[in-house]
Image: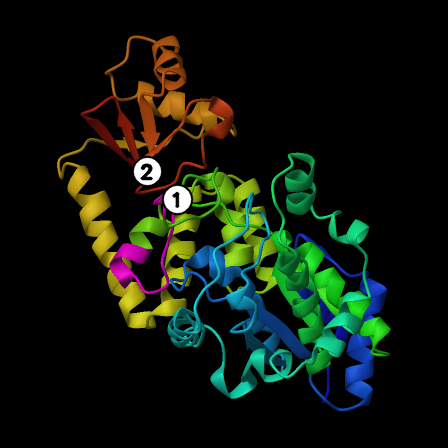
Amino acid sequence: MQINIDDTLKIMLKGVADHTAKEEIIEKLKKAQAENRPLNIKLGLDPSAPDIHLGHAVVLRKIKQLQDLGHQAIIIIGDFTGMIGDPTGKSKTRKQLTPEQVKENAETYKTQIFKILNKDQTIVRYNSEWLGKMTFKDVIELAAKTTVARMLERDDFQKRYSNKQPISVHEFFYPLMQAYDSVALKADLELGGTDQTFNILMGRNIQKDFGQDPQITLFMPLLEGLDGVEKMSKSLGNYIGINESAVVMYEKAMKIPDNMIIKYYELTTDIHPDEIEKIKNRLANGENPRDIKMELAKEITKLYHSVEEAEKAEEYFKTAYQKQQIPDDAPVLTISSANADNGLNLIDTLMTSGKFKSKSEIRRLLTQGAIKINGEKVTTLENVPLLTADVVIQVGKGAFYRLAN
């Protein structure tokens, strides 16, 4: 298998929060190339909550990008570990799922992950295949490969121990079992969120103990939701579900704060890193973030729907959320070109309307949050985007102006 090391590394590390040293990743890629085989990419899914949103999909999108480069995904449905429950981030012992609950959730997961992953390059395994066959002797030998002190390095266990909250012995086995999954599959690479760091690094250590080359690791950051603050969550209502309609998906994507545009490009799309650099430059050069956000919304929507549906969603948004808010008889102002500065251009252009007593009045309205450009509130001169033809400026509740060159 021919592997473009440089491009693979670039795509692999796009948006990643932390990872194994680059030198080790390159060695792993070179070894796979020498053996003429794809990387075995491991992702464990603990089927405790079956509905997937864009936050859950961050890791799956990264795997899809690596599949597009020819590598193979191995999805582990944690039917055995799911009956224990991952204690990560939990302040108390998690309720164990029944085999029936695990199976039902697992089937829902499988249906959803193939909206993202290439089915032909994905193997689905259940960790009961090997964990369910272990003898008590096997379990003792596995447990002997770590210490209680090492387990208590985990934040959740440490906090519960310090606060004298109970920790069941069986919870210590969760990271060990997840680590043994890597041994059973001879995983080359494991992905997970930053909240899975302890579990995934345990896999590297256990593989070494079993005489295997340790897997390389990628840790994806947690994705903030539409509020740009809290982690994306269905309970908080700040999520975009992968099963939502194209119109709803597009509309929700347009609510992403401007400062989150690049992060969403990196974590929720398959856009190449080189193209994302170009988008960063466009924003830095003053292009209207709203226009770039519309491209992002369309990109996200077409990943889960057809291109045609994404285009229809875009047209619906333009009609429902832009055109209907702007009067047909809105005055047209010619953009002032006396200044190179966007903020000063805005003031000069609005002064030509004859509706303002002075430039100071416009500055005051700006700082008060009374001015919107293409629907986005602007409160400082420094944040005024490049003024171009067809841009719409709203001052207060009812004054709209269209711009022309």
Q: Residue furthest front?
A: 136
In the rendered image, residue 161, in percent from the top left (x then y), is placed at 68, 41
Mark 2 vs 1: CB contact within 8 A: yes
The span shown in magenta is 235-249
Looking at the rendered structure, the secondary structure element under dot 2 is loop
- For the N terminus, the image quarter is bottom right
Specify how the rendered protein is coloured. Answer: rainbow
Horizontally, residue 392 falls left or right of residue 169, namely left
Q: Tell me if I can see residue 116 in this picture.
A: yes
Q: Where residue 354 is drawn, which disc sits there?
A: none
Q: Is residue 167 above or below residue 140?
A: above
Overall secondary structure of the magenta stretch?
loop
Taking the spot 37% from the left edge, 60% from the top edge, the residue there is 298
Residue displayed at 68% across by 58% down? 172
Residue 41, relative to residue 88: is it above or below? below
Question: The residue tagged with tag 1: helix, strand or loop?
Answer: helix
Left or right: 113 in relation to 320 = right
Residue 199, horizontal then vertical, whole percent: 68, 60
Task: Please state which of residues 367 and 88 is positioned toward the viewer in this rendering.
Answer: 88
- Asked where in the image residue 245 lies, by quadrant, the reply is bottom left
Q: Which residue is mark 2?
A: 374
Q: Amino acid at mark 1?
A: Arg
Q: Nearer the viewer, residue 39 or 5?
A: 39
Tag 1 residue: 290
Residue 350 spot, x, y in % from top left: 32, 22
Give the position of the C terminus as an image quadrant.
Answer: top left
Residue 39 visible to an observer of this rendering:
no
Q: Is residue 195 above or below residue 24?
A: above
In-image side of 395 versus 58 (left or right)? left
